[in-house]
Structure formats: structure tokens, C-alpha cells
Image (cartoon, rainbow, N blue to C red):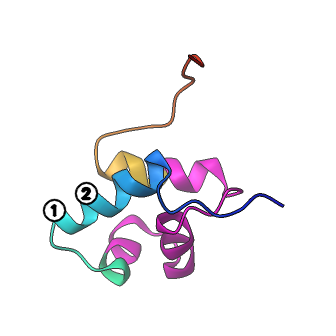
Amino acid sequence: MEDWNRNNPIAEYVRKQRKEGKMTQPELSDITGVGLRFVRDLEQGKPNLMTDKVNQILKFFGSTLKPQPID
């Protein structure tokens, strides 16, 4: 099992966008229609989350998951 990484780019992005929007985790959960536990797990860097739900939150902030070449 992979360790959780609170500093992974997606966790950092969602946390930053939520805070800049002055939203709590429960508010983000309500607005995006995903569960509060999912929002918390995402921001804490849980490694195995459902990509459709991750995209549901990212789309709220005008972003989406996409393939990225490895350097």
C-alpha cells in the first residue's frame, strides 16, 4: 500500500483553490456533489481515489486530470 502524500500536486492544488475560494471542505463537498470523506482523502493525498470523482472536483476549479510525460 502506498503512503499518503499530502504534498502531491493534486492535493496541493485542490487545497489551495478551496482556501482561495474561502470554502470549507464541507462546502466544497456540497457544491461538487462528492462526499466529505472523499474531499478530505483527496486533500490528504490518498493514493487510490476514483478518477471520475477527482475530475468532478477539478472541473469545479476549471481543471482536469490529463496524461503528463515523465521527465
Q: CA distance from mark 2 to mark 1?
A: 5 Å
Amino acid type for the residue under numbered disc 1: Glu
24 vs 20, left or right, is right
Q: Residue drawn 37% across and 77% down?
A: 30
Circles 2 and 1 in contact, beta carbons < 8 Å: yes
Q: Which residues are magenta?
A: 28-55
Percent of width and height locating residue 5: 58, 59
Q: Residue at x 53, y 76 (%)?
A: 35
Q: Position of residue 1 (x, y in %)?
A: 84, 61
What's the mark number on residue 20?
1
Q: Is 60 left or right of 41, judged from the image as shown? A: left
Residue 46: assigned label: none
> Chief secondary structure of the magenta span?
helix
Residue 2 in which image quadrant: bottom right
The foreground one among 2 and 55 is 2
Label 2, on which residue? 17
Residue at 35% of width from left, 51% of height from top?
A: 13
Other-residue count near label 1 (Cα within 10 Å), few / some / many at <14 / 14–19 / ≥20: few
Image position of 50 (left or right of 57): right
Disc 2 marks a residue whose amino acid type is Gln
Dividing the picture into quadrants, the one containing residue 70 is top right
x then y, percent, for residue 17: 25, 57
Indicate yes or no whether the magenta region holds residue 37. Answer: yes
Residue sitting nearer the eye, 53 or 19: 19
Up/down of 27 relative to 47, above or below: below
Which corner quadrant holds the C terminus? top right
Q: Circle 2 sits in a helix, a strand or a loop, which is it? A: helix
Q: Please rate how many residues cluster around mark 2, counting C-alpha atoms within 10 Å: few if below 14, some from 14 to 19, many from 20.
A: some
